[in-house]
Image (tube, helix red, strand yellow):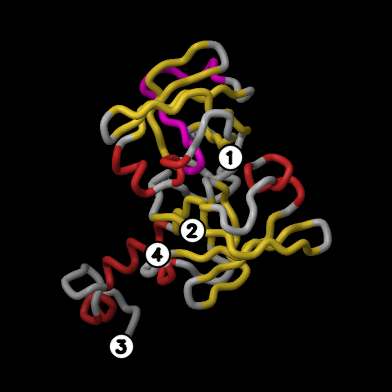
Amino acid sequence: MFTGIIQGLGTVRRMTRKGQDAVMGVETAVPLNDLKEGDSIAVNGACLTITSISGQAFTADVSAETLARTNLQSLKVGERVNLEKALRLADFLGGHIVLGHIDGPGRIVERTPKAGSIVLGVVVEEGLGRYIVEKGSIAVDGISLTVNRFAKDRFYVNIIPHTIENTTLSFKRAGDSVNIETDILGKYVEKLLRPGGRIDMDFLREHGFVK
């Protein structure tokens, strides 16, 4: 589990295909001394398992499923990525609950300066829109952001100077792909309210929510 608060950038040093899977090598200034083989780390918001650590570099296997759903499939040696180590129980939850399970790709279609910030417009694929709400949380390439506005298949987020300076959004442009993870709370609510789910009118009446 993660919070969407990026701890630093990494540089891709290796991206080797192994059949339908891949092995990624990343070098970073983020301290790795508190990590070990088998620990989780989010790379552009995608939860990966560390397979080795050497100094300030680590490797991770990337499954075919992850490659198919994320922009990790198009990464090249030398490109930079957002990094966040897994949340610990004593850590400060500064963003929102992020699982590192990418729902699908988004595409930046607008990048508009506004005062010292930047407003990004991002288009998502059909089906994701139902989990995106105004003033709700969303993770873009692993970054916890607040949705300013949503219309049809497009949402808008405000990127403050600190986020611009410390994440890959500093060099993302219109046309670039980003990983999208919507808020997990909406998915559980939807499932519970479906026919056959545990919450229905009888449940609400039984527990005093409706008369």
Which residue position is annotated with label 4? Answer: 186
User: Which residue lies at the image location 57% right of the left edge and 16% below the top edge?
Assistant: 56
- Give the image location of residue 132, x and y in percent: 47, 67
Which secondary structure lies at badge 4? Answer: helix
Amino acid type of the residue tagged 1 in the rendering:
Phe
Which residue position is annotated with label 3? Answer: 211
- The part of the chain drawn in magenta is 32-45
Question: In whole angstroms, how far apart are the C-alphas of marks 2 and 4?
Answer: 19 Å
Amino acid type of the residue tagged 3 in the rendering:
Lys
Which residue position is annotated with label 2? Answer: 106
Question: In whole angstroms, how far apart are the C-alphas of marks 4 and 1?
Answer: 23 Å
Question: In whole angstroms, how far apart are the C-alphas of marks 1 and 3?
Answer: 40 Å
Residue 187 in magenta stretch: no
Which residue position is annotated with label 1? Answer: 92
Question: In whole angstroms, how far apart are the C-alphas of marks 1 and 2?
Answer: 28 Å
User: Which residue lies at the image location 26% right of the left edge and 31% below the top edge?
Assistant: 19
Amino acid type of the residue tagged 2 in the rendering:
Gly
Position of residue 9 in the picture relative to residue 86 (left or right): right
Which secondary structure lies at badge 2? Answer: strand
